[in-house]
Amino acid sequence: MLDEDAITLPTGFGRVRTKRIPYASIQRVWETRLPLTVVLSLATKEGKFEVLSTMLPDHRSYIDVGKFLYAQVLRRPSEPAAVIGN
C-alpha cells in the first residue's frame, strides 16, 4: 500500500506480516526479472524488501508502483546514485 510518506509491504515467511517503509529510508531500488514474475527490490538500512509483480492486480499497477518508488529515491539529489535497473 502506497501512503503519503511510506509504503507498507507484506514481509516474512508467507508474507503474513507487514512492514511500513518510509520513502526517505529507501536507499536503492532495482528490478530483477525471474521466469514467472518480476521483483522490485528496495534497500534500506534495515534490510531488503520486495514488491513482486504477482502481488499486484496487473502489470500496469506494477509499472506505476515502480515509477513512483524510483521517483521517491531520485527526489534526494544530494545522495549518490541510488537507482539501478536490470
Image (spheres, rainbow, N blue to C red):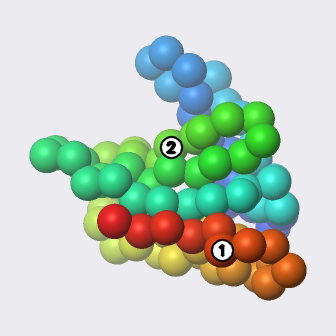
**In the image, residue 62 lies at what x, y percent?**
40, 64
Would you identify the image quadrant in which residue 33 lies? bottom left
Q: Tag 1, which secondary structure?
A: loop
Residue at 45% over, 18% down: 14
Q: Tag 2, which secondary structure?
A: strand
Q: Is residue 36 left or right of residue 82?
A: left
- Amino acid tagged 2: Glu
- Amino acid tagged 1: Ala
**In the image, residue 42 lies at what x, y percent?**
59, 51
> Is label 1 in contact with label 2 (beta carbons under 8 Å)?
no
- Along the line of sight, the residue nearer the viewer: 60 or 13: 13
Residue at 58% over, 28% down: 11
Indicate which disc residue 81 carries.
1
Q: Comparing marks 1 and 2, which lies closer to the viewer?
A: 1
Residue at 22% over, 47% down: 34
Is residue 72 visible in the rendered structure shown here?
no
The residue positioned farthest toward the top in the image shown = 13
- Along the line of sight, the residue nearer the viewer: 80 or 55: 80
The residue positioned farthest toward the front in the image shown = 80
Between the residue at mark 1 and the residue at mark 2, the CA separation in whole angstroms equals 20 Å
Residue at 67% over, 35% down: 47
In the picture, which quadrant includes the C terminus?
bottom left
**In the image, residue 64 lies at what x, y percent?**
47, 74
Is residue 26 visible in the rendered structure shown here?
yes
Question: Which residue in the structure is indicated by mark 2?
Answer: 50
Q: Is residue 46 left or right of residue 28?
A: right
The residue positioned farthest toward the left in the image shown = 35
Density class for disc 2 (Cα within 10 Å; few <14, some 14-19, many ≥20) is some
Would you identify the image quadrant in which residue 63 lies? bottom left
Whichever of labels 1 and 2 marks the residue nearer the N terminus, that label is: 2
**In the image, residue 29 lies at what x, y percent?**
56, 61
Asked if 84 appears above or below 6 in the picture, the reply is below
